[in-house]
Amino acid sequence: MAKGRKTGREIQRARQNQGKDNRKKLNQWRQDRMKGAIEEYRQIIEDGGVPQLRMLARAWNVPKSTLQRRVKGNGHFHHVIGRKPLINREDEAELGHVICTLGKRGFPLRMLDIQKLAYQFAEKKGLRGFSKKREKAGYKWFQGFLKRNKNLSIRKPEALSASRASGFNPPVVKDWFEKYKNMIKSLGLENAPDHIWNCDETGLQDHFLSTRVVAEVGSPCFEVTGGEKGETTTCLASINAAGGYGPTLIIFKGKRLRADWLFGAPSNTYLRMSDNGWINAELFTEWGKWFVQSLPRNDLWPHLLFVDGHASHVYNIDFLNIMRQNNVCVFALPPHTTHYLQPADRALFKSLKHYWRLEGRRIMVESGGKPLDRALFMPLFSKAWKEAATPSNAQAGFRGSGIFQFNPAKINKNLFIPSQTTERSFGETSMEPDEVPPPAPETPHRPPRGGDDNDGDDDDDFCHPQRSDLPEHTPYHPLHDAVQPEISPAPQSPQHLPLSTIVTPPPLSEEVEVVTQPDVSFESLITLPVRERSTTSRQRAKPPSYDLTSDAHFSFIKEREEKKKEGRGGGGEGGRGGKQKNAKKSRQVNQNACAICLHSYGNTEDPKATEDWLSCAVCSRWFHESCAEDNGVIDDDGVLTCKDCLFPEM
């Protein structure tokens, strides 16, 4: 046969294997079987026998060569193939800890941030393998990093305002739960879930857009909606801990109410109008009358109603009088904590909006994208309400917030971590045992010294402050000093050398070159974000207690109203001067709305109408007091400088 020509059997075998993946498959054995084979091998040796590697490999279905290599070594091998990662497992675990810590604090890292951080670490360590031209780790390294760290994944973060992040902190929540516990004990409602209520508002938009759809690759994908923007309709609902539902109020934007708009509404549902479609004091008082009418008349036990800190709730003396006269105690939730403490937000409204969008998209398809008519609102709302307003959802809201049954431990401790950005200084930060890895040497460390949707464009650089760039007297840092504390060397060691560079001197007859690797960690390459609160000497009047139907709260409201009347008028020289100053302020403010929420001064529909107004000293724009605190800096003299004037380049 001529050299190079294939036989018929070889040709047939080649045809059979045509199109198959002939690459050699490695690591097809199981790790637990390899562990069992090693244990049996060692047991045979302890019993004085002679183990046969080939027979053991066949019995446990593992490769003989791999078994031989592991029993001759220390037995600690990883079940992997290919080259070792550029960054070892211990350092990658440290990087994963940094990612988790920043994510819990409310500042998660993107893929590009992690790639750049890994490159900086490799440069400091003297590791070569990442692209110097791009100055970041490669995409394949990042994918392998995620595979090696199963607790990490790419997710879409939820927006959390700075006010909610700082307001939801352990001291505030603990104090509120203590006062709530005393309240239900005094009312005798520990075992009366049908007497514990919560009312809240949410907005329903008639702009229905799917989150994800299936479409043809390479072709544009559109979804027809009723308009460019949706109109928001307010829904005020009430639930109790036993799974019951009180009256529901729907608020349309406008002035004239048509009777046919109520057709198809769920039972115990009312419809009203307001200028902007939001709740106000008059509508909330009217809802309060319906609420007390729905309560059992022969029941002498008191009821407890939870509300948020909206002005139409806290300062609405007409509503509070109605509640007080009908043996209903109104208890307020702490500011900026309703996203976790309010039962309606925890269960009912999430489910309601889900079914509202489902029914809305169905209507859009049937009508060909026709705008939602108000006559169709109630039939659509009725279907969504029927699916969402279930007893289990109402009970889950109270149970998840720890209100009933009383259980503050329902609030996960990780939810408090974002508040550390503003509520605690570095010296006061206390991390959980599982949040900070223990320091390697067991020596005391240095004490503290005082103390809109992303469009996916990652071309902006992520700057990580270096440890060498920090000032000499850097405050105690939970990621720096907790992981790498300053170490007091042993007495026989030189005091001016770090512990990592101290080595035992070799004998004089030997010449040993000691090569030490730079002491670098991921914690030293990044700094936890800190946002300092603006300090002011102004004393802001706040309600004396969470019990809004108490005598102290009624006295607070009356004093507040009297001070407002005195500020608007007044007699004598002092009164005349105050009147002129307030009149001048009123003329200026009337010409401008709040630069943040765009509500005009003096508007009765303004949810922040009870707050003071401040003007920026640079651009002269006006802000509500709360809007000014969140979007600027107020000095000790009460002078405001807005964020746009502080950072004009942004």
Image (tube, helix red, strand yellow):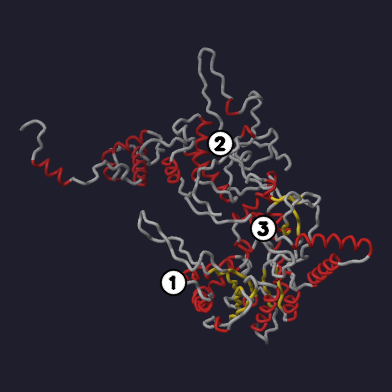
Q: Please tell me which residue is depicted at 11% across the width and 42% down the height of the picture.
A: 11
- Compared to residue 10, the image places residue 238 above or below, namely below
Quarter of image, res 624: bottom right
Q: Is residue 160 left or right of residue 425?
A: left
Disc number for residue 521? 2
Instruction: Check disc 1 and report its element: helix, strand or loop.
Output: helix
Residue occupied by mark 3: 596
Residue occupied by mark 1: 362
Name the N-terminal-most of marks 3 and 1.
1
Disc number for residue 258? none
Residue count near mark 1 (Cα–Cα under 10 Å), binned few <14, some 14–19, many ≥20: some
Please identify, in this view, whether the residue under mark 3 or under mark 1 is nearer the observer.
3
Quarter of image, res 571: bottom right
Q: Position of residue 638 (x, y in %)?
A: 79, 52
Residue lying furthest bottom: 298
Residue count near mark 3 (Cα–Cα under 10 Å), binned few <14, some 14–19, many ≥20: some
Q: Position of residue 632 (x, y in %)?
A: 70, 51
Which kind of residue does numbered mark 3 sit on?
Ile
Name the N-terminal-most of marks 2 and 3.
2
- Residue 100 can be seen, yes or no: yes
Which kind of residue does numbered mark 1 sit on?
Arg
Q: Nearer the viewer, residue 620 or 331?
A: 620
Instruction: Check disc 2 and report its element: helix, strand or loop.
Output: loop
Q: Please tell me which residue is depicted at 60% across the width and 48% down the height of the picture.
A: 433
Q: Nearer the viewer, residue 338 or 618?
A: 618
Spatial separation of the CA atoms under disc 3 and disc 1: 36 Å
